[in-house]
Image (tube, rainbow, N blue to C red):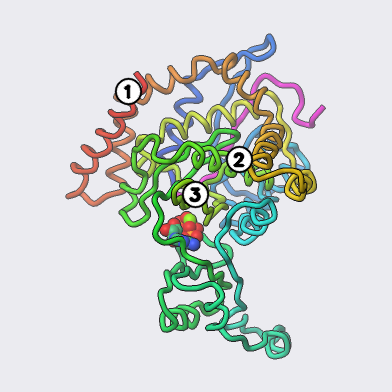
């Protein structure tokens, strides 16, 4: 028995950054869901926005589940989450013990080991080693001069230079020749950089958002402004590539115990090249996801309610060897490995039990979400969000734009 005990009332904590749109949607929908029947008992759920306060490491934690959007940047709540997981069995979406591997670098390494088709990637030393007398000896003794052009020659142009830990396009540049390469490297300063072969051109950019065991693969247009990046497009990938992206999204999540993550793959024909597989705090703003927002909020509700009501326990340890046994098995070809990875992912996410829970305990959720998204209350939230996000002279245009996309979702899901 977990220290969380055998309760029928559950509190879901929201640890938030600046966002207010999806949290309000989430809070409203948890109220509308009401009692959740499970194994003969009715469970009730409430939500609470978590504040940052001094805490005793022995303090009890009232939350059964915490959805965290802050701790990647803010250390006090990060340490509170770790204590909550280790002392109180609080279920964390995401668990900060996975943060070290939220650096892109670790995800590339794991995916390479598992056999995914990662473009050639080289980590180069700091341009300017950390300027501190403590490290001066190390920098002069071990940070050896190297030939940047020789490294670039191995990768080939065009390539991308980007920080090993990544995030929000900070320090990302496309490099087409040696001159740009040297300039970008000089400017990288104290950022630690990858050089990665560019996939260029490609047929489709797929962004896959995963919440628990559910993944949505969406067509993404990185060259457009944020509100146009997710394009509403079904069947934009060959079936085989779509399946591979579903499997590799689930795989990387289950491998590192991430539960809320977005991934990026570039697809040419049916060849899938993953380029970014670790986002501790994926964007789910209404004004980014629009048509896909109802899916995202439903998935977040389903997974967090499942974790709260069934008493799912946090797991801070990983089982890398199980995955490597598949990766290293000479008798398995790539499709057979994908099948095994999918099975391991489903075991981690307890997918069968989760689906059954969704079909029984949360059978009315789709209807509740549909009714709310179609309601005046949702439109009010949308308009309020638009007013907070865009300048006054653009608000009418954005209102018409997003109402159109939400209207399309309502029509498609009637
Ligand atoms: N190897 C590559 N080939 C082609 N395009 C690339 C490659 N690497 C990065 N890009 C382009 O640069 C963008 C930013 O790179 P990346 O996703 O790795 O950085 P990021 O900082 O994680 O961005 P974000 O957090 O916003 O997703 C990608 O969305 C893609 O458009
Ligand atoms: Mg990215």
Magenta: predominant secondary structure element?
loop
In magenta, the rendered stretch is 1-18
Q: Which one is nearer the viewer's eye here, 80 or 97?
A: 97
Q: In the structure shown, which secondary structural element does the residue marked by tag 2 occupy?
A: helix
Q: Is residue 384 visible?
A: yes
Residue 14 part of the magenta-drawn span: yes
The label number, if any, that marks residue 17 in the structure image: 3
- Which marked residue is nearer to the observer: mark 2 or mark 1? 2
Q: Earlier in the sequence, mark 2 or mark 1?
A: 2
Q: Is residue 391 above or below residue 10?
A: below
Judging by the rendered image, the residue that carries numbered circle 1 is 374
Q: Is residue 317 visible?
A: no
- Crowding near pointer 3: few (<14 within 10 Å), some, many (20+)? few
Q: Is residue 206 above or below residue 172?
A: above
Residue at the right extreme of this rendering: 1
- Which marked residue is nearer to the observer: mark 3 or mark 1? 1
Q: Earlier in the sequence, mark 3 or mark 1?
A: 3
Residue 406, percent across and down? 31, 31
Which residue occupies 43% across, 23% down?
369
């Amino acid at each position: 028995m977990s220290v969380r005990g055998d309760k029928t009332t559950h509190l879901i904590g929201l640890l938030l950054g600046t966002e207010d749109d999806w949290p309000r949607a989430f809070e409203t929908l948890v109220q509308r869901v009401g009692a959740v029947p499970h194994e003969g008992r009715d469970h009730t759920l409430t939500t609470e926005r978590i504040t940052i306060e001094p805490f005793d490491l022995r303090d009890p934690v009232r939350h059964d589940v915490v959805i965290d959007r802050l701790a990647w940047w803010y250390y006090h709540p990060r340490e509170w989450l770790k204590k909550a997981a280790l002392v109180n069995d609080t279920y964390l979406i995401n668990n900060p013990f996975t943060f070290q591997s939220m650096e892109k670098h670790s995800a590339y390494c794991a995916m390479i080991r598992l056999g995914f088709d990662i473009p050639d990637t080289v980590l180069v030393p700091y341009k300017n080693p950390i300027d501190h007398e403590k490290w001066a000896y190390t920098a002069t003794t071990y940070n050896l001069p190297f030939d940047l052009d020789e490294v670039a020659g191995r990768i080939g142009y065009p390539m991308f230079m980007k920080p090993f830990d990544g995030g929000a396009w900070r320090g990302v540049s496309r490099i087409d020749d040696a001159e740009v390469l040297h300039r970008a490297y000089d400017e990288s300063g104290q950022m630690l950089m990858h050089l990665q072969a560019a996939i260029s051109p490609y047929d489709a950019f797929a962004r896959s958002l995963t919440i628990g065991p559910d993944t949505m693969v969406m067509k993404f247009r990185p060259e457009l402004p944020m509100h146009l990046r997710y394009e509403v497009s079904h069947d934009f990938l060959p079936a085989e590539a779509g399946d591979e992206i579903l499997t590799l999204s689930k795989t990387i999540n289950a491998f590192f115990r991430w539960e809320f993550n977005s991934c990026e793959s570039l697809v040419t024909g049916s060849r899938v090249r993953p380029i970014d597989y670790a986002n501790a705090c994926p964007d789910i703003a209404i004004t980014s996801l629009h048509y896909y927002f109802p899916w995202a909020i439903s998935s977040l509700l389903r997974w967090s309610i499942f974790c709260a009501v069934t008493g799912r326990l946090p797991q801070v340890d990983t089982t890398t060897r199980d995955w490597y046994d598949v990766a290293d098995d000479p008798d398995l070809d790539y499709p057979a490995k994908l099948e095994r990875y999918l099975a391991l992912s489903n075991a981690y996410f307890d997918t069968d039990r989760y689906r059954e829970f969704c079909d029984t305990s949360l059978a009315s959720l789709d209807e509740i979400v549909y009714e709310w998204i179609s309601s005046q209350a949702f439109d009010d939230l949308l308009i309020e969000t638009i007013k907070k996000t865009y300048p006054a002279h653009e608000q009418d245009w954005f209102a018409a734009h997003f109402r159109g996309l939400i209207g399309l979702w309502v029509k498609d899901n009637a």
